[in-house]
Each structure stands twice: as structure tokens, then as C-alpha cells.
Image: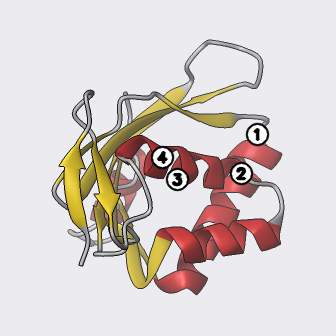
């Protein structure tokens, strides 16, 4: 079983089976969404998420409104398991990074409380500072510091 100790900046470091600091996990997480190589992206998904891990996202308001018009009251989008997670990340990469010319960048200051890591990210054009989007992630980790649940809250 993994144990935790606090660092000077409030993050915690896993010992035993853990794989790093809150910021280290956050950095690996954000880097995944920018990874152009499909094989490296797949490996990163498998290293970051537990086999049954899930990514949950409440879509933008316009999509929620359209879903409500169709009678859907629960519009949370879900990708569960490595295959679905890989498709989710690949699709975001195609749309925003490869196709849109954007990059995702972590904001630093990731914090960990028990088995949860909170991090924030922004979307920018490479080489530019203007923030075009962003959000907050809450990652729930297992005893090996692999993601079991990833709650994404897009928007600034």
C-alpha cells in the first residue's frame, strides 16, 4: 500500500507503489493531450489510467441545451477503459492540437488531498500567451497513483 507525505508547497509525494508528486502527475496528464504519436499516446493512457478508469466531462452549454431539446436530462459524457480513453484523447488531439493549431498547457500548482489531484490547464496557440480556453481537472487515483476517475470542468 502507498503512503503519502506532504511537501513544502502542499502537494504530496507517494512512497511505496506511488508514481510521483501531484505536479508530476498533472504534467504527465497535460502532456498526453499534446502527444502527436498515437503509440506514445496509447502508452501514456495505459500508464496514467487504471484499466477501468473513466473520464467524465460536462459538455459546453450549447450541446447541453441541444441534448435537453431531445429529452436528455443527463448530458455528462463518459469514456471508460483504455480503448475509449485513447479514442477520447485522440479525438481531442485531432480537433484542437493537430487540426486547430492549439496546445494545452498546465498552470502549475497542482495539489493533492488523499487520493485526489486537482490541476488546471489552458489552451493557447503555441508561442503565444493569450489564453483561448481552459479548465480544471480532478483526478481520483488508486493505490498505484493511476487515475480511476477524471472529472473535467472546461471553461474559465
User: In the rendered view of the protein, which quadrant contains the C terminus?
Assistant: top left
Q: Quadrant of residue 69?
A: bottom left
**Crowdedness near tag 3: few (<14), some (14–19) or many (≥20) residues, C-alpha within 10 Å:** many
Identify the residue under disc 3. Answer: 29
Q: Quadrant of residue 91?
A: bottom right
Mark carried by residue 24: 4
Residue at 35% in and 64% down: 67
Distance of label 3 from label 2 (alpha carbons): 18 Å
> Residue 132: x and y, percent?
57, 24
Distance of label 4 from label 1 (alpha carbons): 27 Å
Whichever of labels 4 and 1 marks the residue nearer the N terminus, that label is 4
Residue at 62% in and 63% down: 89
Residue at 74% in and 54% down: 35
Identify the residue under disc 1. Answer: 100
Kindly check if marks 3 and 1 are in contact, taking CB atoms under 8 A apart as contact.
no
Mark carried by residue 153: none
Mark carried by residue 95: 2
Amino acid at each position: 500500500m502507498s503512503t503519502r507525505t506532504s511537501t513544502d508547497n502542499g502537494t504530496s509525494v507517494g512512497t511505496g507503489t506511488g508514481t510521483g508528486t501531484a505536479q508530476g502527475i498533472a504534467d504527465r496528464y497535460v502532456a498526453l493531450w499534446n502527444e502527436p504519436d498515437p503509440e506514445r499516446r496509447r502508452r501514456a493512457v495505459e500508464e496514467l489510467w487504471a484499466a477501468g478508469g473513466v473520464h467524465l466531462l460536462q459538455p459546453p452549454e450549447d450541446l447541453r441545451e441541444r441534448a435537453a431539446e431531445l429529452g436528455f436530462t443527463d448530458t455528462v459524457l463518459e469514456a471508460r477503459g483504455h480503448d475509449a480513453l485513447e479514442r477520447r484523447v485522440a479525438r481531442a488531439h485531432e480537433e484542437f492540437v493537430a487540426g486547430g493549431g492549439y496546445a494545452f498547457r498546465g498552470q502549475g500548482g497542482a495539489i493533492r488531498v488523499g487520493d485526489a489531484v486537482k490541476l488546471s490547464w489552458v489552451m493557447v496557440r503555441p508561442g503565444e500567451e493569450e489564453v483561448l480556453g481552459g479548465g480544471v481537472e480532478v483526478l481520483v487515483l488508486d493505490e498505484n497513483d493511476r487515475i480511476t476517475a477524471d472529472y473535467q470542468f472546461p471553461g474559465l
